[in-house]
Image: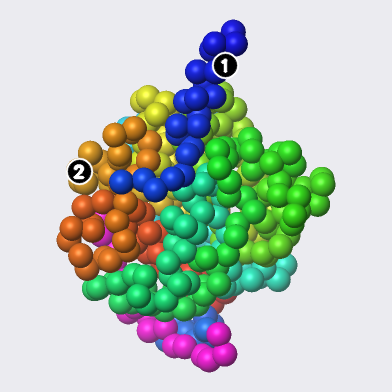
Amino acid sequence: MIYRFIITISTLITLTACGNVVVESLVNPTVTVGNSETTIPVDAVTEYPFQLSPQVPTTVNVAGTPIIEMMDWKELPVVPVEISQRSQDIYKLGQELHNNPYAFSVVGDCESSPSWFLGDFDRGNSYYSLGENIDLKLVIDAFHGSFERKNLAVGNGFNTASVLSPLWADPEYCLSVESPLECEVRLNHPSFVFILLGTNDIFNLDNFESNLRKILDSLVEQGILPILATKADDQEGGNTINAIISSLANEYDIPLWNFWRAVQPLPDRGLQSDGAHLTWAKNYFDDPKAMENAWPWRNLTALQVLDKVWRTLNISGY
């Protein structure tokens, strides 16, 4: 029993280690960015790579909820084609509750920290190059401050259970009764939350769906729009976790960022030799060599999803 425990902990450390790895009008709505007003032309709501409109077959569970079949989620677009009315209603509730329309949070493990995920977009133009994706500069400017801030629901080894447990909350910032998720929401008042979980849930797979439901229910009740993401790895086998994530995104009618699909054309599907960590390069989206690696694609497609959601909600008049 002790030997099995040591092996499990060693595997967990291997998976989670983060080292140096090799508005009102439908026409031209105006939003405030910083201290100035910026007009968003309607035609700026661009089409993104991988956007397909597949006819997705569904099955029905005993409660009558449509569930995406195991294989169908692989055909879903990286960036959602449409933002549902349900998502718009969640956002509208959040604005009534005074959530910050220019703030997002992140829930995830250490690879979801600003050192890896999106932080460069608060650090200045020298840290990234948008290339032909210059339209993303508007969403980068709008959410300035969210990209590099410390997320209290992000931590080494975090899984769905961790973010719900006060035992994992940072005592420097959080109340003793708060979970990391509750602490992050209280301090940031976000309108959107990227949920980047699953890799470290392989050791407690039976509780993954129920824990993820608790996270989603908590956010939705507070008018915070969750953005669920599939993961690049398949540590559990059979892509069971991605199927659950996709199914819940369908059930809750919230945005799905199908990151798994974005890395499929890359060498080794964007994964290092351990099959868990992503291949790294700087966020130079106009550098073909850099774009052979997974990290630039993760940051690019995350920006595209945020941009799609934000522009759609502003054009919808919320």
Specify few, some or many for label 2: CA neighbours under 10 Å numbering under 14, 14-19, or 20 or more.
few
Q: Which residue is mark 2?
A: 267
Dot 1: what SS?
Answer: helix
Pick the residue in front: 171 or 215.
171
Identity of the amino acid at label 2?
A: Pro
Q: Nearer the viewer, mark 1 or mark 2?
A: 1
Question: Label for residue 35?
Answer: none
Q: Does residue 49 show up?
A: yes
- Look at the magenta stretch and give its main secondary structure: loop
Does 48 lie within the magenta span? yes
Q: Is residue 82 above or below residue 128?
A: above
- Which residue is at a point 58% across and 49% down the rendered structure image? 154
Pick the residue in front: 123 or 301.
123
Image quadrant occupied by the N terminus: top right
Distance from Cα at disc 1 to Cα at disc 2: 34 Å
* Dot placed on the residue nearer the N-terminal end, 1 or 2: 1
Quarter assignment of residue 246? top left
Q: In the rendering, at what x and y percent does residue 238 appear?
A: 36, 25
Q: Does residue 68 show up?
A: no
Q: What's the magenta region?
A: 34-53
